[in-house]
Amino acid sequence: MQPVSGVFLVVLPLLLGACAGGPAPDTRRVDRSLTPGVVSAEPGAATGRQVLWGGVILGTTNLPDSTRIELLAYPLDSQEKPQRDDPPQEHFLLEQCGFLDPVIYAEGRLLTITGTILRVDKDPLGVAEQTCPVISAKELHLWPAERMNEAPVIHFGIGVGYGF
């Protein structure tokens, strides 16, 4: 009986770990004190620093050798998912080498990114004289699409059921 308990103790944490829903980004070098607003206010001090940011995609543009994604940042929860219930932070841009499909990286999707701050550009929306941090992603986590317009599924019934 002892070997079965030992196997159980080894397998159980692996099974529980597989149920985790969020990304597991490498956050050892991430500066969590940097937000898009902090970087916009002091652009020179943040260049080259590592960040972990997330937000809602506002638009995706494919360029000849890269893709640019504009995001509205939101605070992250304990699973590093952007929280749309919290007040939004400022805009930021992601520049990624290669092609990212704009159908997949569509407007309204949630995205979490770890990456390096490249520079600070003028806000692509042209809002006053605001600036917008630009980051190069090391890791991307696109969250499953939220289904906001679906009605809840409720079933009423009496009886015995059997299914697989």
Image (spheres, rainbow, N blue to C red):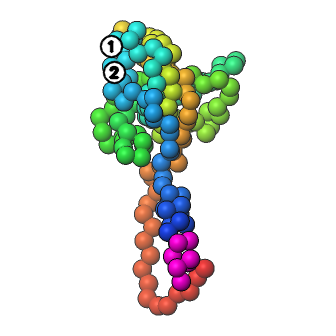
Relative depth, front residue between 85 and 154: 85
Characterize the local packing of mark 1: few (<14), some (14-19) or many (20 or more) Cα atoms within 10 angstroms.
Answer: some
Indicate left or right for 5 with 45 as reference: right
Inspect the image, locate mark 2, and give the three-letter code of the amino acid beneath it. Answer: Gly
Visible residue check, residue 90: no
- Residue 10 spot, x, y in % from top left: 53, 65
Instruction: Check residue 41 in the rendering and tell me which mark sits there, or answer none.
Output: 1
Residue drawn at (48%, 53%) of the image: 21
Instruction: State which quadrant residue 91 falls in.
Output: top left
4 in the magenta segment? yes
Residue drawn at (56%, 34%) of the image: 139
- 60 w.r.t. 154: above or below: above
- Residue 153 spot, x, y in % from top left: 45, 67
Visible residue check, residue 158: yes
Residue drawn at (56%, 77%) of the image: 3
Range drawn in magenta: 1-8
Q: Marks 1/2: CA distance?
A: 6 Å
45 in the magenta segment? no
**The C terminus lies in quadrant:** bottom right
Q: CB of mark 1 within 8 Å of CB of mark 2?
A: yes
Q: Which residue is mark 2?
A: 37
Characterize the local packing of mark 2: few (<14), some (14-19) or many (20 or more) Cα atoms within 10 angstroms.
Answer: some
Relative depth, front residue between 40 and 114: 114
Query: Majority secondary structure of the magenta segment?
Result: helix
- Residue 119 spot, x, y in % from top left: 48, 13
